[in-house]
Image: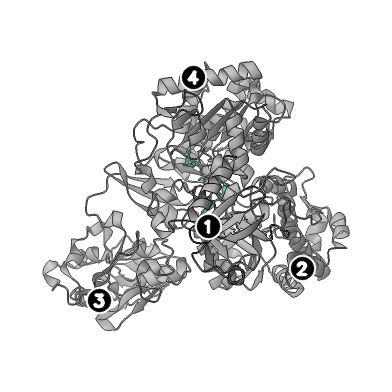
Amino acid sequence: MRLSVDTIRVEVASGATVLDAVRAAGAVVPTLCYDERLTPQGSCRVCLVGIRGRAMPACTTPAADGMEIRTGDETARRSAQLALELLVSQLPARALDIPAERSELVRACQHFGLTRSRFDGATRDAGADHSHPYVKLDRDLCIACSRCVGMCAEVQGTFALSLAGRGFETVVVAGTGGPWVTSPCVACGGCVDTCPSGALSEPGLADPRPIGRTTTTTCGYCGVGCSLRVHERDGSVAAITPAHDGPVNRGHACVKGRFAHAFTRSRDRLTTPLVRDGGRDSPLRPASWQEALTFAATRLAAIRDRHGPDAIGMISSARATNEENYLAQKFARAVLGTNNIDNCSRLCHAPSAVGLAASFGHAGGTNSVDDLDHTDCILIAGANPTEAHPVIGARIKQLVLRGARLIVIDPRRIDLAEMADVHVQARPGSNVAVFNGIARVLLDEGYADQDFLRSRASGLAELTALLADHPPDRAARLAGVAPETLVAAARLYGAARRPAIVYGLGITEHAHGTDGVRTLANLAILKGAVGTPDCCGVLSMRGQNNVQGASDMGALPDMLPGYQRVTDAGVRARFNRAWRAEVPARPGLRILDMFASAIAGRVRAMYVIGEDIAQTDPDSGNVRRALAACDLVVNHDVFLSTTAEHADVVFPAVPFLEKDGTFVNFDRRVQRVRPALDPPGQARSDFDILHLLARAMGADLGCPTPADAMAECATLTPTFAGISHARLDRDGPLHWPCRSPDQPGEGRLYLDSFATPDGRAALAARPYLPPGEQADTTFPYVLITGRRLVHYNSGSMSRRTPNHQLRPHEVLDLHPDDAARLGLADGDLVEVTSRRATVTYPVHLTDTVTPGQLFTTFSFPDTPTNALTSDATDTDTGCPEYKITAVSLSPVRAGRRVESRRRTADRLWR
Ligand SMILES: Nc1nc2c(c(=O)[nH]1)N[C@H]1C(S)=C(S)[C@@H](COP(=O)(O)OP(=O)(O)OC[C@H]3O[C@@H](n4cnc5c(=O)[nH]c(N)nc54)[C@H](O)[C@@H]3O)O[C@H]1N2
Ligand SMILES: Nc1nc2c(c(=O)[nH]1)N[C@H]1C(S)=C(S)[C@@H](COP(=O)(O)OP(=O)(O)OC[C@H]3O[C@@H](n4cnc5c(=O)[nH]c(N)nc54)[C@H](O)[C@@H]3O)O[C@H]1N2
Ligand SMILES: [Mo]
């Protein structure tokens, strides 16, 4: 459409509004109730423009071909100014004290030349609500524009906010109107972000002092990879806002990425190296870099020379950048001479890497998250995105509100189960049975895409044979659900035109996690819903900010960067030439095997970067025994973690907000990470620490800067060959594979063929097998472990922020029927005993868990959940069975509280 705005001619797409045309022409019309992310309301009357002599709201009037828009039209301008004057006459004068760049209201007033004198002072005194640590409400500044209500409903999908009261008394309320902190608000920050008047604000931005520099970077909490704008003031983070052009988050964020940054200036940040040189019972003491580096280097070299390179086990960090992980695996292979390097993906999505690669070819999700926009049915299995990947959880809610069907497969009634068409509340560990049951229905009832199966898939005969004795009622029995529920789920998925699969740790962290991934992938193959135009594929909700990248960079015992096998002589030869080193041919140890080898005396040193193995790895009593058995433990961390407490040398590392490099998010997007702050004290990046330690051992790792490391990796790794910092800075994020500098990355994979040896998607015939650990008469409950919204993994970061006020300690979710049987009330203490330890928790009564099942997290050192978890692991990958621990419960009678805590500690040190 062609039209004119104040004589400037512009062209806009069909469906555009007059406001779009005005902005395309570069003209300025103030708005108050408008936010491009929300349904326009046209209620504030401040954006009036003249069209054919009439005053029309720009935000709701559709643009039309040949239209002549006048932003300076006298009638429109006068009416708009009147509307604004009426509005501000009700506001206290402080509404104008807010700096213009933070208040659309102030900017609108400036536009119309309205000054302070028009503010007659407060005519109401509704007061403030500062109960929430992040979201502050000044009711007297509320102009009832309803944008916050729109954000909470349309973007976040939480529906926590509404407008209450009449006329000028109208004001936003959270929940039922009590203190904000007690409402269902999840503190995504969307309301604060959209508020035009300052009624809703956050502490960092309410501060009138000016912001220093603002840096665009990628969030370092979960694997969604939100683009954030970090605003610095006086050397610390003043505030973080979501980048509105962020390709994944599209202007949204969550309570962690957006608000939980205070940990960066926590008083207990490590700011100098620490050394323990008086034996294991002596304390760690501050040391100079020179001293600590020499200490670590001489001992590592001595162990390598005396016991061989494989006596050292190295764990690299899924929290660190690609470039740091690239250096870490180069350090292990080229400096130490061992393939004993692994990363946290082992505990998390190793079954995804192996399972997806076997089914489709690449060790990552099959599609870009953007493809979700086109789906008509989402199957979520073993993932809880509204808590663990909140921005994606919000996106899924938006899709369901717009009409997409939703299937949830989860033993707990998670938030999304409330809006699901079908909730298959399957027993933990029954995934393979459930997916085989669904596959059988897809085949039996004609939902399978036979053309796709003939031309693009393999393994149908074997799968069909296996499914002969997997009828849906057997699957339903194993899963503990009604057969009709399973069939209903299968029919919904089967009937969808563009179904999407989204899954998480409820599939992978099991004794048969890889089988779970493969039998889930079968469903997409049977439907022809992967590798085809318009397909939505299979998305694995990768966990940590860079767990995809840590594996992509080769921090794995059997793979060099880009999943090139260490056993391949040709691959090794290329790396040997480039590195002037000898990459060992034999695959190294996985994380849990490193612990077993340490206890057996074969591994003598552990070098752990940014993973709190003593708190987060399974059966932590065993981990501590492994650490105690080593001659040397080297650790980098931002804080004195539980693991650091067992180390001989601790190097003070810096978190994502203070470093340079890249992360890979869950949909294989390589994104830039930029330093927004200077590190405190003598803390340094993992990149620098690895270089310094290599140098102290007489070696040179090359690639002096992160950009150089990415460049070196690109020359050695075909799937990243087209990626460089310069290109990312110029063009923005890129999906891998990206094979040359002139190629865009591939978001949707396999359109021509799958990357398997025969080019076909591989169906897998995997039978249901029972879990590694099961409930019995001594340990009759199944403990499920996982995530809650406000804390993150070990909690080392989130506990050092006001998120702690939102959840100050851990609880054990228990069904009210079980509680009644045990005589427990909400908040009572209960001892949870597994075959390995006892830990005491306060109980939280909730019917989101079924009777016989329990739920908790592992984010608090004083409730050490992983003392309980077992050493059972996935047969294909060694991923721990975190999702099933058989336990017994014993109520703690008053007075026994202290004693039980002490017993926990004793057992840990056994
Ligand atoms: N707030 C927050 N966000 C996080 C993290 C955090 O600690 N806190 N950690 C990050 C990390 S590292 C990761 S890996 C991701 C994890 O993200 P998710 O995988 O979404 O999180 P979990 O809560 O561990 O597990 C997901 C669900 O699996 C279900 N489940 C358990 N057993 C089974 C089963 O046998 N079958 C099925 N179908 N479901 C089952 C659980 O009930 C749970 O709801 O989150 C990331 N994001
Ligand atoms: N029971 C149970 N246990 C689990 C799970 C479960 O579901 N249930 N999930 C498992 C999963 S999926 C995961 S991913 C793990 C996570 O376990 P961890 O990786 O141990 O936990 P995190 O808190 O993510 O981070 C580890 C450490 O890295 C530090 N850190 C942060 N950024 C940096 C950095 O840039 N450099 C360095 N050097 N250090 C940094 C933090 O301070 C923290 O001490 O937990 C696993 N443990
Ligand atoms: Mo994870």
Q: Position of residue 239 (x, y in %)?
A: 33, 52
Q: Secondary structure at mark 2?
A: helix
Image quarter hosting the N terminus: bottom left
Q: Does 868 sit left or right of 250 as displayed?
A: right
Q: On the image, numbered disc 4 is attached to which residue?
A: 695
Marks 3/2: CA distance? 65 Å
Residue 67 vs residue 220, the one in the foreground = 220
Give the crowd class for mark 2: few <14, some 14-19, many >=20 residues within 10 Å.
Answer: many
Q: Residue at x 63, y 73 (%)?
A: 421
Query: Which is closer to the viewer, label 4 or label 1?
Result: 1
Residue designated by label 1:
841
Q: Determine whether label 3 and label 2 are within 8 Å by CB.
A: no
Mark 4 close to ligand 2, CB under 8 Å: no
Position of 97 with respect to 220 (left or right) is: left
- Name which of mark 1 and mark 2 comes first in the sequence: 2
Left of 352 or right of it: where is 255? left
* Callout 1 secondary element: strand
Circle 3 crowding by C-alpha within 10 Å: few under 14, some 14–19, many from 20: many
At 38% from the left and 39% from the top, the residue drawn is 269
**Picture quadrant of residue 755:** top right
Q: Is residue 36 above or below residue 240?
A: below
Amino acid carrying label 1: it is Tyr
**Which label number is shown at residue 285?**
none
- Residue at numbered disc 3: 76
Asked if disc 1 and disc 3 are in contact, CB closer than 8 Å, the reply is no
Real-space Cα distance between discs 1 and 3? 64 Å
Residue located 35% across and 76% down the image:
42
Q: Is mark 1 within 8 Å of ligand 2?
A: no
